[in-house]
Image (cartoon, helix red, strand yellow):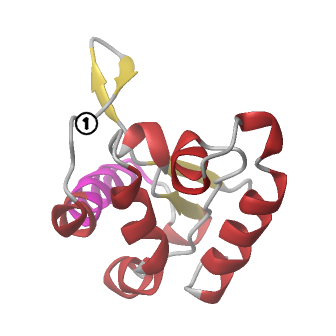
Amino acid sequence: DCRLVVMHSAQRDGIATRTGHLRPEDALDEIVRFFEARVSALRRSGVAADRLILDPGMGFFLSPAPETSLHVLSNLQKLKSALGLPLLVSVSRKSFLGATVGLPVKDLGPASLAAELHAIGNGAD
């Protein structure tokens, strides 16, 4: 029995796209709605809930504005409480970190580590 990671994203014609300019104050509700629908469909298809891991899809999949990803990163416990499943968060060298600290991708190692530690402190598994 392998685990299944389900990542938040928007799709058009089967291709992942930006969700648009998801505002920080709307992000958590949108992510919860997305996962409620996906988890429900997976459960109806026979996938056990204990096999699921949820990924909020930081950066590109939320908004080009770094504030949205930062808001989600700081509120992971709310997502975890609302959804009741483990959260995987991958922020390594994401563009929202570069926009936040003003560094190119190649220099985002320390910012990535800080963001991952922040995620763990806020509920990421």
Given residues 66 and 86, the one toward you in this image is 66
Query: At x 56% / y 84%, what residue is drawn?
Result: 123
Residue 14 drawn at (x, y percent): 35, 16
Residue 94 in the figure: left or right of residue 23:
right
Residue 33 drawn at (x, y percent): 20, 60
Does the image show residue 107? Answer: yes
| Number of numbered discs visible in the structure rendering | 1
Magenta stretch contains residue 38: yes
Given residues 59 and 82, the one toward you in this image is 59
Given residues 122 and 10, the one toward you in this image is 122
Tell me which amino acid carries mark 1.
Thr
Query: At x 25% / y 61%, what residue is drawn?
Result: 27
Mark 1 crowdedness (10 Å alpha carbons): few <14, some 14-19, many ≥20:
some
Residue under numbered circle 1: 19
Residue 125: name its quadrant: bottom right
Quadrant in which the N terminus appears:
bottom right
Residue 70 in the figure: left or right of residue 2:
left
Query: At x 44% / y 53%, what residue is drawn?
Result: 46
Magenta extent: 31-46
Up/down of 122 relative to 15, above or below: below
Tell me which secondary structure the magenta stretch mostly adopts.
helix
Magenta stretch contains residue 43: yes
Residue 64 drawn at (x, y percent): 36, 39
Does the image show residue 43? Answer: no
Query: At x 57% / y 62%, what residue is drawn?
Result: 53
Identify the element where label 1 is drawn: loop
